[in-house]
Image: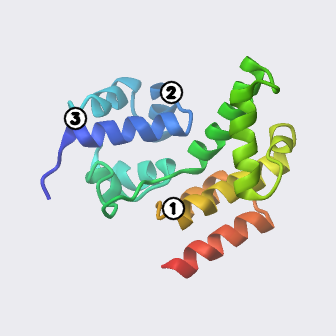
Amino acid sequence: MKLDSVKIGRFIREGRLAIGLTQEDMGDKLGVTAQSVSNWERGESLPDISLLPELAQMLGCTADDILSGGQTLGPGQRRVTVAQMQEALRALKRVGELLGENHFIYRMVIDALNTGMNTDIEPAFTDPHIFDVFTVEMLLGCHAAGDCIDPVDVQAHLPPSKAREFLLKKLADAE
């Protein structure tokens, strides 16, 4: 396998941003400088091989995913993380705050989600438990659509619950 440092750097950067870390935060957790993380992300250098297991765990992926720049997925597949789903839910809430909950754009999106999920998504915006349940529901929908959901990411970023365990069982059954 030929390593593409630019793709690897882009993958590390996207993963870092998805989990809400600064370069300094990531560097601190890995025992390297923020400048080292910056160099990886720009494709100027690569992480030391000894850091790959910890970096992979942090990003909710495998060392192969990092070394391939995220290209180990099958054709048409996307990697979807807990952080991405949670940010999507927060973004929906922000649309309601920005435009107003009665604005037609917000209502169309919310009504479409409610119809598609056969429920009311808005309580997830104020109740952390319901927020986690909807995160799981959205991840299940992504999984059903063929997206890649990493069980390690789910375990690392969702608190234990029946919903989380249901998702993990679905992911295990699909392997």
> How dense is the environment of label 2, judged by Cα within 10 Å: few (below 14), some, or many (20 and up)?
some
Residue corresponding to mark 3: 45
Residue corresponding to mark 2: 22
Residue that appears at 76% across and 61% down: 160
Does 74 appear above or below 79? below
Residue that appears at 34% across and 61% down: 73
Identify the image quadrant of the N terminus.
bottom left
Q: In which quarter of the image is residue 79?
A: bottom left
Does 109 appear above or below 104? below
Find residue 103 and report its horizontal and vertical position in percent. 76, 24
Find numbered disc 1 in the image and state the secondary structure of the residue it sits on. loop
Q: Is residue 42 visible?
A: yes
Q: What label does residue 66 carry, if any?
A: none
Q: Can residue 46 be seen in this view?
A: no
Which comes sooner in the sequence, label 3 or label 1? 3
Residue that appears at 39% across and 27% down: 33
- Tell me the amino acid under the disc marked 2: Thr
Determine the CA span between mark 2 and mark 1: 22 Å
Residue corresponding to mark 1: 150
Q: Nearer the viewer, mark 2 or mark 1?
A: 1
Lateral position of residue 52 relative to residue 79, left or right: left
Which comes sooner in the sequence, label 2 or label 1? 2
